[in-house]
Amino acid sequence: MHGDASARLFGAEPVGLPTGAGYAVGARLVRSYLDTTGRSAAESLLTPSAEILGIAREPLGV
């Protein structure tokens, strides 16, 4: 969840995300995951990121 400048730096594809927006995007994805699953952040601490992203993206239509 980095901005385009960081994406370029690390060899990732830029997607139109401004620098510094990563926190807001990450917070939105985590909130979507927690709301969808009904789990708390503490309960989700060891959940693999791929699972969180897969579930979080569904309600967003991404």
Image (spheres, rainbow, N blue to C red):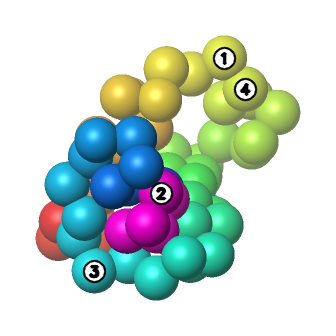
Give neighbour class at mark 2: few <14, some 14-19, many 20+ (Cα, 10 Å): some
* Label 2 sits on residue: 6
Residue 16 is tagged as 3
Residue 3 is tagged as none
Residue range highlighted in magenta: 2-6
Kindly identify the residue that appears in the image at 49 percent across and 20 percent down.
48
Residue 9 on the magenta segment: no
Vertical position of residue 43 compared to residue 3: above or below: above
Kindly identify the residue that appears in the image at 33 percent across and 55 percent down.
8
Q: Nearer the viewer, mark 2 or mark 4?
A: 2
Marks 3 and 2, how far apart at CA: 12 Å
| Residue 42 drawn at (x, y percent) | 82, 33
What amino acid does circle 1 point to? Leu
Q: Point out the tag, 3 or 2, that comes first from the N-terminus.
A: 2
Q: Residue 14's image quarter?
A: bottom left
What amino acid does circle 2 point to? Ser
Q: Point out the tag, 3 or 1, that comes first from the N-terminus.
A: 3
Marks 1 and 4, how far apart at CA: 4 Å
* Label 1 sits on residue: 46
